[in-house]
Amino acid sequence: MEAEMVAVLNTTRNTVLGEQITVAGTSLRRLVGLLGKRGLEPGTGLLIIPSQAIHTLAMRFAIDVVFVDRNWQVIHLCPAMVPFRMTGIHWKARCVLELPAGVIAETSTVVGDQLSFTK
């Protein structure tokens, strides 16, 4: 079964966070996440839904992490999260977006920004 892909836009800043974001909407896809990957190409990422916390245990590379609430608003950011770390639990989060390190800075994304997702 092929994974669903979406584009993620920051409508507040009129920037693109990624054009080929894989949706991890099943238990198996959420469990596997980015494990086993050597990195993320520009424009790619993973949208974990639902999720309120993530880890980078056994990962080989840093990622930018964006926590999003049910209204698709950014509620917390973890830029350049290195391997073998865990985030805290963000109770108001609906999903977590994992992106290549540097995307948060490149797109000037901040807490409070509004995101949109398109197929």
Image: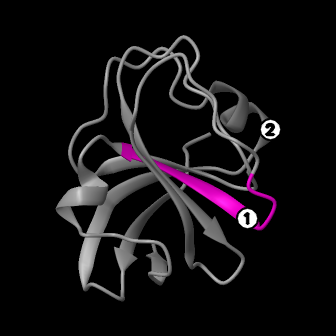
Residue picked out by circle 1 = 94
Residue bearing mark 2: 27
* Circle 2 SS class: helix
Please give left or right for residue 44 compared with residue 42 in the image.
Answer: right
Rendered location of residue 69, percent (x, y): 68, 72
Residue in view at x 80 percent, y 38 percent: 27
In the picture, which quadrant includes the C terminus? Answer: bottom left
Q: Residue 29 carries which label?
A: none
Count of residue discs? 2
Boundaries of the magenta span: 90-99
Q: Nearer the viewer, residue 56 or 90?
A: 90
How does the figure colour the protein chain or chains?
one colour
The residue sitting at 30% across, 62% down in the picture is: 19
Residue count near mark 2 (Cα–Cα under 10 Å), binned few <14, some 14–19, many ≥20: few
Indicate which disc, 2 or 1, sits on the residue closer to the N terminus.
2
Q: Where is residue 5 in the image (x, y as percent from the top left)?
A: 47, 57
Q: Which amino acid does label 1 sit on?
A: Arg
- Looking at the image, residue 65 sits to the left or right of residue 103; the answer is right
Mark 1: few, some, or many residues within 10 Å (few <14, many ≥20)? many
Image quadrant where residue 4 sits: bottom right
Mark 1 element type: strand
Depth check: give the residue in front, 68 or 29.
Answer: 68
Looking at the image, is 26 positioned above or below residue 86? below
* Whether residue 38 is situated above or below residue 96 in the rendered picture: above
Kindly identify the residue that appears in the image at 62 percent across and 39 percent down: 1
